[in-house]
Image (spheres, rainbow, N blue to C red):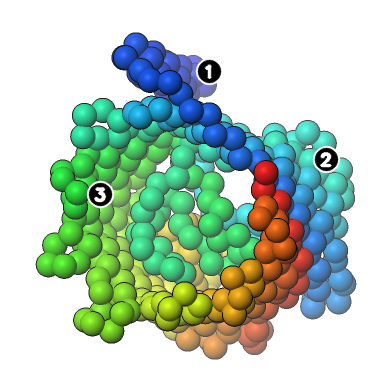
Amino acid sequence: MEKLSLIKNKRSVFFSLSFLLTAYLFARPTFAFEFEPIFSVNNFSLFTHDPLTDKRYFINFNRLRADLTLSNDWLKFHLIADNENYRSEKKIVYLSTPGENLPVDIHHDVFTDSKWINRFYLYRAYTQAEVLNSTVSLGLQRVPFGVGRLWTPTDTFNPLNSVSLEPGEREGILGAIWTMYFGDFTRIMAVTAADDEWNAGKNSLHIKSFIFNMDMGATYVHSKDFQMAGYEIESNFFKTGAEIRSEGGYFFDINNEDDFFKGILGLDRSFGEKFFAALEYLYNSAGESDKKRYPLFPKDPLLFGNLARHYIGAILNYLPDPLLTLSLATTINLNDSSFFLSPSVSYSFSDNGTLSTGALLFEGQNGAEYGSLEPTYFLRIDWFF
């Protein structure tokens, strides 16, 4: 009872601070607000085959998204809410992403049975204000950490999941972000995220600046489970027209009294307006070099993410026509030789509509990281209005 009362008190403090911030902002002289509503409908038809049972599954997923922004010159309210509906005999694993343990349930099942689920999903809900040379945002939001195209090892809040139908969809945190700007090239960011008991479960300090013709950043993250000191660098690769990027973090696992390093080195280049290519290497010292030593139950995927030590990945985009996009993404486990491959074709059939088709393909021996995952083929339709 005492613990429950403490959680309720922390929840009350959080909402009280949110109310006071909003009241303070509205008390200032303001200008007319601009309301920008964006609605979209996304439909996925997925076909997958389970090699273990030799069964084939059809999955249909629909999402109606309302993306609402109310803003003026210094204040913004942003809300993104989804109604998700899918029918399936099999759990959808590629539509989910790693996420923070939130103190509130952002999913609410409206209807569910063995083959059909309809649910409400609160994706974003935050207030952001400009105060002097800084911005303050409070609520359900994403932390903009990391520079990688396929992996973001320093983003321990909402890391990129490249083995996903929607790598850009990330759950985010419930917390506060304060960013102070020093001129046009330097910023300091402080982040605090609530855990599932309304404690300040994860805190971070991040600084980024343009130094020696490079974007350079340093990040420190602290939680009850780990500490991380990280860096990120982005720069032009001499005069080749390419951009080189790197980020990495030194982690100390408090629970297991162990430390490890994760980092990426990437190179990408655009060739005119039609072709883009990116190559990225990931090193993970916490991983294993032999698949026989992979843990049966991996540790926290948010921290460790990958089973092996060495990976390489690539992204290729080609636009033969302004309405047509051909894409290919792949990640290869260099230790067990298993790999993930995702080819796709996207066609814009109207100003507000896009049709896409593609696959998530996995290959590898028994016991390899990608060897046990089943291939999935998809057809996607997106409408915006």
Earlier-in-chain disc, 2 versus 3: 2
Closer to the observer: label 2 or label 1? 2
Earlier-in-chain disc, 3 versus 1: 1
Earlier-in-chain disc, 2 versus 1: 1
Instruction: Name the residue that disc number 2 marks.
Output: 112
Q: Position of residue 102 (x, y in %)?
A: 51, 38
Q: Position of residue 189 (x, y in %)?
A: 26, 43
Spatial distance from mark 3 to mark 1, Cα to Cα?
Answer: 37 Å
Instruction: Name the residue that disc number 3 marks.
Output: 206
Please tell me in which quadrant of the rendered image residue 9 appears. Answer: top left
SS under mark 2? strand
Looking at the picture, which amino acid does disc 2 mark?
A: Thr
Question: Dot 2, how many residues are within 10 Å of its Cα: few (below 14), some (14-19), or many (20+)?
Answer: few
The answer to whether residue 267 is seen in the rendering is: yes
Closer to the observer: label 3 or label 1? 3
Closer to the observer: label 2 or label 3? 3
The image shows residue 25, relative to residue 288, as above or below, that is above
The image shows residue 263, relative to residue 104, as above or below, that is below
Q: Residue at x 51, y 42 (%)?
A: 101
Q: Residue at x 38, y 50 (%)?
A: 144
Q: Residue at x 30, y 49 (%)?
A: 221
Query: Image check: 142 left or right of 39?
Result: left
User: Which of 7 and 236 lies nearest the eye of the viewer?
Assistant: 236
Looking at the picture, which amino acid does disc 1 mark?
A: Met
Question: Dot 1, how many residues are within 10 Å of its Cα: few (below 14), some (14-19), or many (20+)?
Answer: few
Residue 1: numbered disc? 1
SS under mark 3? strand
Q: Position of residue 71 (x, y in %)?
A: 44, 29
